[in-house]
Image: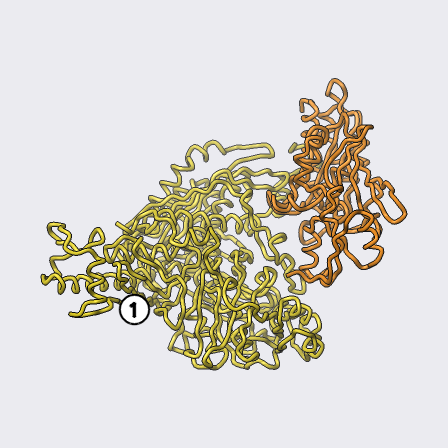
Chain colours: A yellow, B orange
Amino acid sequence: MEVGRKLTRVDAVDKVTGRAYYTDDMGERPMLVAKVLHSTIANGFVKKIDVSAAAALDGVVKVVTCFDVPQIPYPTPGHPWSVEASHQDVCDRLMLTRRVRYYGDDIAAVVAEDEIIAQRALKRIRVEYEELPPLLTPEAAMTPGVTPIHQECPDNVLKHTVTNLPPKDCPEFSTVEEVLASPKFHRFEGHYDTQQVQHCHIENPISYAYMEHGRITVVSSTQIPHIVRRVVGQALGIPWGQVRVIKPYIGGGFGNKQEVLYEPLNAYLTTQVGGRAVKLELTREETFQNTRSRHPEHFDVEAAVDDDMRLMARSCRAVSNQGSYASHGHAIVANSVNGFRQIYADVLGHKSEAYTVYTNLPAPGAMRAYGIPQGAWAAECLMEDIAHAMGWDPYTFRLKNLMPEGYVDPTNGITCHSSGLKACMEKGAAFIGWDELRRAYQNQTGPIRRGVGMSVFVYKTGVWPISLETASARIVLNQDGTVQLSVGATEIGQGGDTVFCQMAAEAIGIPTEDVHIVSFQDTDITPFDTGAYASRQTYVTGMAIKKVGLQFRQKLLDYAAEVLDRPAEGLTIQNRAVCDASTGEVLRTLEEISQEAFYSFRRSVHITAEDTNQCKDNTFAFGCCFAQVEVDIPVGKVKILHLVNVHDSGKLINPALAEAQVHGGMSMGIGQALSEEMKFDSRGRLLNGNLLDYKMPTAMDHPELHALFVETDDPTGPFGNKALGEPPAIPVAPAIRAAILNATGVALNRLPMSPQYLVEQFTAAGLIGEGGKDHV
Amino acid sequence: MYDFRSIYQAKDVADAIAALQRDPEAVLIAGGTDVLIKIREGKLAGCSLVSIHELRELSGVTMEEDGTLSIGALTTFRDVTYDPLVQKHLPVLGEAVDQAGGPQLRAAGTIGGNVCNGITSADSASTLVALDADLLVRGPAGERIVPISQWYKGMGKTALTHEEILLAVRIPKSHYQGWTGHYIKYAMRSAMDIATLGVSCLVKLSADKRRAEEVRLAFGVAGPVPMRAPHAEAVCAGLPVEAAAARIGQAALEDVNPRDSWRASKAFRLQLVKELSGRAFREAGRKGGARI
């Protein structure tokens, strides 16, 4: 069995020895360097730009401004394109803009012989603005009479949707509001907030572009090369076939590179310097200010529960701060409210409402788990607060209300084909010692207290039927019986290449060691796939690999049958040989068959297989997190003593990589929970756009991370597998919050749960007293 | 790429001073862990550098005949921490500078640079202030000693003039003998961070270890410059250790003046001053043998 092996990643040695090529390792030297001029206002207009002093600087090759670039609005999110106009992404971007929409917006660019000259040139550009007051919150942006941030959207509300699932066949109640208001039930409400955080991938966005034969090549650190090709074509107003995109190894993306960020500008700049290669690399500060992040969302939620711990109805109103550009737009908050709804079954009904509002902040976009961490935060805060108020065991309360197996989402039809969530909870509770700890932590006093908490989540696998799911693969034979596997799906650090090889090997019947991945995508050569996002590739691309792998196997067997002059039906592939399927007798080695195929005078053929698989299914992955914490009340510090995630992601293709993936996600969850937050001043200027002031936790801030699994066999997954890439980040923050609540009795309703916020809340709750004598 | 106009490698201290005299705009660079960041941020872009990085005579820790510990300005954080003299006589200082940044920074950043930056959050600052260290500087007119109490002149400003170079940080014997100390760096992370508050407490116990004969308490980030807490020190002097531990935090509130900033509110910093002063005192007392 190749699927299920704990193989070392296929790129491990190259990456740890520095042999692996990333964008900055490639291309001609010296290369021209581009730098972008960013606005110093958050809202307004560029009236005039004087670039004469910059252009006069020795070593400056070209200066372009927002008055020069093509005026073709284009979309940036890494979604599959839709041939129906109503489903297409919002086109609200220009490469450089006269209409300034956030502090740092792109208004001009310099191409110079090196980075320092480019920097010096930027300082010599004089800009005149007409400034408008910055609108930094949805409330401010929705105030009647303000100047729209985008003309097409007069009230600054990009989209507003309502999902109403009123009670059915219920004589007593006809609306969700009636259930929530009924005196028969216990009614709860909560107001929960999430913050704007960033991905913090190691490699900042970088690309370089050059021209060859009149076409533009862009080499980019991206998750989505085929989508970059399309968007560059759209932005420059040129046929898409005029663009070639190459994706080398990348240093992480987490959704930030599921967006076409600076590739269109980079492509345009090479056309302005005669096709010479131009590199456009962002600094860390620019990455914070000028690329995507996770949406801050505000939730107002309500629930009615009966005495038997059953959720009768819930409602959820979510407002998402979209910042200055649509990016992935309403899809994110729509996911948030869906995630809020799906995880628990409401007996009578459910209602949700979602707003996506333009403001003058740097635009959030896709980030690992795409709105679900926000929705799960709201859902799990509410569950915990209900359990706390009712004196219920939060574990039992959750267990009584989980999404059942066989659940079909009434709005999109996504079906729960398999669920190991209950088993995950059992495993996690046993690992952490839930019952004993909950008993032990009752009635604590003193400045240092401990607590234990949990949370659960559900996550769909890929984007069908909300969006297209398509994937292609190609397998070609080598003379020695090994193969190359080429897919449009991308390795972005998650280990995609390794599991692709394992799945191909499994389908063909050869060892994974005999499958060589073509890691780099090149849109001129690579089969089409929309790329790495939505935890889709192992599921969706996996289906394509299995399909093509089986076709390839059949072609190999058919050719062997010709050579051996016996029917293919009785043949099989094992131990690198074509064997008699019933006796196991080796008839020819794969190497012999392959050389025959390549060089036969009788019939020479290069055995290859290539196909597309359109996936029209989806399935839910599940999991939970248990956290044990120690809270130092007087100084607001939370120490995580133990943290465990338990996942049902179906069958694991590579358990070692699965574990590593969970560790990374948990780490991200810790940062979101306790310390990370993008902070802005009243002018909309990012205050902490660097890795010193943005408090991403270090190794020293981590407990040992534990990852456990419950392996269901999902009937729809190509190998029984379901989503895993994004989910590990989801449940950590609410579990830590629940543990703090357990320790202190204080419910924290916004993220991050940073020391200052804790001290404020503990002071308000009377846990920190006057005189400082209580807590020494 | 770093945007600087030139770099001059000084051959010795006199040569470095001469280079600074020649160029009133020149920037002195030692470990580079602060200067290079400022160049990259654009604050010092295009500057001329005078490097003293290679002046080995400025690094290392020695004990003078009178027991004064002299720490060369170019001694890295790491070399301060692992120096046997520091470990024997001044462990609190070694522990304090071991909390700066991460391992790479501590191998490059120097204690002299930390002091000359004049930054209130510097990890060596509150402990050196508590120790009442002397700073030995040399300029065109010769050498002078500046007590650390007169060193800090405001945010990022010190008593050092453009043509002067810090040679050594000196701690007279009476400032450390008989004292034990503890430094608490309170930051948002356990590494790679700057202090939200730094608290250094030194205590000299009575022979029976029951009383705090003398106390020195100093803070970083409780004001624009590193500062002593004279009121708290006076309140605690002579008290039984438990009483001193209970009172020192509240007393220190009268000494400090932290500001509201986006990094931390004044109220939060005051709570930290109150709580951590007592914790630092207790730990310093324990190190001296107090049962507390």
Is residue A176 shown left or right of residue A121? left
Between A157 and A504, which is closer to the camera in this rendering? A504
Res. A82 in view: yes
At x 36%, y 55%, the residue is: A498
Q: Position of residue B242 (x, y in %)?
A: 71, 25
Percent position of residue A585, x then y:
13, 51
| Vertical relation: A142 (above or below) A774 | below
Side (left or right) of A613 relative to A577: right
Could you tell me which residue is drawn at 74 percent across and 46 percent down?
B55
Q: Identity of the amino acid at label 1?
A: Thr
Q: Residue furthest top?
A: B208
- Give the image quarter of residue B186: top right
Residue positioned most to the right: B141
Query: Residue A662: horizontal and vertical position, in percent?
Result: 42, 49
Q: Position of residue A612 (x, y in %)?
A: 29, 68
Res B188 visible: no
Q: Where is the C terminus of chain A found, in terms of image quarters? A: top right
Q: Residues within 10 Å of mark 1 (few under 14, many from 20)?
A: some
Q: Is residue B241 left or right of residue A182?
A: right
Quadrant in the rendering for residue B142: top right
Q: Is residue A642 above or below residue A607?
A: above
Q: Nearer the viewer, residue A618 or A527?
A: A527
Tag 1, which secondary structure? Answer: strand
Q: Chain of mark 1?
A: A
In the image, taking residue A686 as reference, residue B177 lies left or right, namely right
Look at 22% across and 69% down and name the residue there.
Answer: A605
Taking A143 as reference, is B68 above or below it?
A: above
Circle 1 residue: A612
* Viewer-closest of A219 and A710: A219
